[in-house]
Image: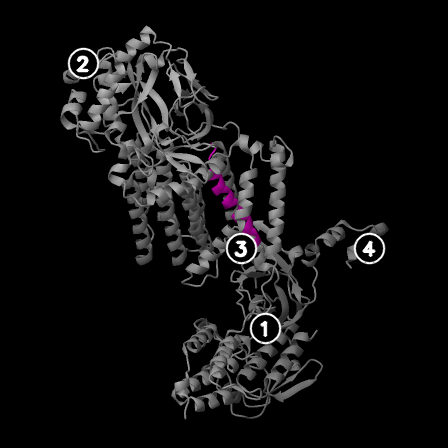
Amino acid sequence: MSVDGVAHGGEIGIATRAARWFPGLERGRKPEALPIRLDRRRIYIVPTRTGLGFAVLLLVMLAGALNYQNNSALLLTCMLGAAMAGSMLMTWRELHGLALHSLHAEHGFCGARLLLHLAFADDHRARPGLTIAVDGLEQPCPLQPGSNRTSVTMATERRGWMAVPRMRIASTLPFGLFRAWSWMTPERNVLVYPRVLDGTQPAARNDDPNERTAGGDDFAGLRDYHPGDPIRHVAWKASARLDHLLVREFDRAAPGQPLRFDWNDLPGIDRETRISRLAGWVCDAYAAAHPWILVLEDRHALGPASDAAHYHRCLTALAESP
Amino acid sequence: MKLRHVPAGRPAKPAPLDTQAFDLLCATVLCVVAVHVPHLPPWYTAALAVILLARWWQRRHRRRRVAGWLRIAMLVAVPATVIAMYGTPLGREPGAAIICGLLVLKILESESVRDARMAVGFACFILMSALLFDQSLAYTIVAGLVLLPAFATLRALGPGLPQPGWVAAFRPGAVVLAASLPAALLGFLLIPRLATPLWGAPDRGIGRTGMTDRMAPGDLHSLLTDDSVAMRVGFTDGPPPEHQRYFRGMVLWEFDGRAWLPGAAAARPAPPAQLVAHGPATVYDVTLLPSQQHWMFALDVPLAAPEGAMMGPDRTFWSTAPITHAAHYQVASVTDYRLGADGLAPGTRAAALQLPPGFNPRARALAAQWRAQVGDHDAAIVNAALDLFHTGGFVYDLNAPPLGRNSVDDFLFDTRTGFCEHYASAFTFLMRAADIPARVVVGYHGGYWNEFARYLLIRQSNAHSWSEVWLAGRGWVRVDPTAAVSEVVLADADGATNTMIGRAGSWWLPWRNRLDVVNRWWNQAVVGFDDLKQGRLFQPFGIAHATVQMLGAALAVVVLVALGVGALLASIRPRARPRDALAVAQRRLQRRLSRLGIVRGNHEGPRDYYARSAQALPDAAAQLHEFADEYLRLRYAFHEPPAERTRKFARAVRHFRPHRGQIGV
């Protein structure tokens, strides 16, 4: 029940009343639980500019055919008009029946676009013309029968838990005469890792500085991406030529003393910068597969370890820190 | 980080046109220009096609834009050419020529999706304009089919088309056109027609050949070889016998030595000649196709003129307005009659005996000789002339040799070869020379009787001319001198007098006549569906006259219902589980093997089963091992078996036919 529902004097607000008839209006703003099924009450459709042009053309043709009392031309005009109306239904059908079943967010760092994996219920229909606009950026999201999975990216502006923004899913197929769209706001929060500052050496560690560089940024080669790999190690240029992602691999450091990244060793800089710097070091150490210890503000220490779980624990802790 | 905001549906840079969409666009435009071929000069449409193909080739192989100066030059050249051809840019043909040229020019500059969409819209409009020239069923169907490439182009302009994707491009258009046909037909029935045009109707004066009000030997030739339909005459009680199927159009009185003309007698306002019927009247419906002329045709001889027509003294009638749309009228005629038997007014008599002096001396001499032989007996002179045509070595031939100044003499005594005009002209001349009032009648004769739809189909090639002579006591009597030449000519299978020679072997002619019933239906039900017929649309529901408001309301209901039904159909989701192609192929293979007695046990996994089969069929063992490996790979190595490999597997299974001979001993 909406908040507007309890308006002054027990009267039901217009918005609520409208939302009762057209739930799509309300659903556009309020997050809702998955699965989100797109049905007729929440799919909107309007002609595109081409569609409007065709409508004007139809009127001209109609006037000409009627004026010249030419029934063949009128029949052709009727065919074109009926086909146009039919194409509206076909466009509508591109969205109708879509159901967003699951949404899974990649780990992403603040400032970069976060990858969201969307899985729709597979109804064995190809929907090659879908686009999904997330915070204004329209992204082509073709769905293939058999695997109705696609990915979009969302902008991240701050670290921590973030609600998945409202997404507009749209299509103009088959003829580009109409545009059907619908809003989806999945009730889902995603964790955004802190912005990463790199290029700075850890200010304090318990060992010889040279050891740190041994496990540092020496580029060793490329390997396939696995979920959990830091997104900033993705070799975008190299990946662009393939249909899967590659990540840069760095020289493994000789196992040695774990690195120690301590919140309290970074005095004199503001909180967010401190978090970003710590996050950067964690990423570097993880990329180098060098064990590390992260000491948080409350002196709680994580580690030592060098595995993915540790990496994510550290970044989550940093992201969630107040 | 601020992301560039890209508004929906409005890319910052125009999306470029891909090759496949451009190919389809060119194909669409080529089709549209082709639809206009019948009424534009052939070299003009050929030039447009060449320019279009050159552009297609250039974009595909050179990947460059067309130079601006070239486009501007052509923009000037198209209207200039049209004005040079027609003398004016206005009118139907020049207009069509200009818009076809502009459409091709649009392709020259089309580089973006937006350009292509505009071009498709423009092409649809030009397609419709072609129907202003010809409303026949075949032409309309052809124009309708061109919508398919147009919609395919629109589809190809959208995303997600597989790269050679012709079928995928055409499918949505075909589906939507087929599905919207019922709604289109209902809309066609209900869209209120205009009783009077909003602006000037197009000029239709040019183009169509038809009868002219002048007859010189050889003039009808183009008409006699024209197979287009002239009119359809519905007889509910069966057709008149073949020898009475004479439809009079106009009467020609005046001979100027070369041609027969209506003359002053036809234009003289006078009451129709007295008609005494000797038999029952035949009532029939005529549908006269647009001729742009005033003449209307009636079975020899009509009792009264239909509405909107005037009857002349010789009982022919003409429409008060040129026949620009198919004209429907009902007439009653009598075939056994006495016309003008009460006597001939002096003026009429003089007109019926008029001959230019100084022409055809030999024919005059022959007529004088007949007159001297038989005295007052006019009918005997008529018979003498018919005898001459019958036994004098005359030949009916559409390829008649040209005649000199004394055309009747040349024909009678020299060439003796000709068709209806030659015979009618010579016969009428002989009669007048023998002092018998006579006149030439032009009209149609014969026709194909369609038993199924009970109408007589009359083509332009049924055009005919004959004579009428005035005999004391009997009045005007129809004499067909051509009939005297050869009975065979009039007893053509088609019933058409003149089409027999040269084209009698056309095996499809009878079929075309039988199928004409479709064209007739089209002309009556579709082309002729005007505001009057539309007003009677609701008569079965007890509404005598449907007003525009009623039609509009019905149209609105139809649109809503059609959209509702369409939405219902569109929301039907396909079957939840599609056939698993791999399992289907696998079951097929098992079925084939089990026919040879190798039945898969319930406990048996695919690997064991194929191993056992391979043992049983040593000749096919290699193949079976291959099947087993591929099946297991497809089934278990992928989350979803790749479609292409599954198809390949299924194909291999289809072609695999194990037989008993392979069973190892």
Specify which label sits upstream in the sequence, 1 or 3.
1
Element at badge 3? loop
Along the line of sight, the residue nearer the viewer: A98 or B513:
B513
User: Which stretch is magenta?
Assistant: A68-90
Give the spatial CA distance, label 4 vs label 2. Answer: 121 Å
Q: Which residue is mark 1?
A: A108
**Residue carrying label 3:** A172
Q: Which residue is mark 4?
A: A6
Residue placed most toward the observer, B125 or B460: B460
Amino acid identity at mark 1: Gly
Quadrant in the rendering for residue A230: bottom right
Q: Residue at x 22, y 11 (%)?
A: B375
Q: Secondary structure at mark 2?
A: helix
Answer yes or no: are tags 4 and 3 on the same subunit: yes
Residue B153 appears left or right of B48: right
On screen, residue B72 above or below B475: below
Location of the C terminus of chain B by quadrant is: bottom left
Q: Chain of mark 4?
A: A
Which callout, 1 or 4, points at the residue further toward the start of the chain? 4
Considering depth in this image, is B604 or B659 the residue closer to the camera?
Answer: B659
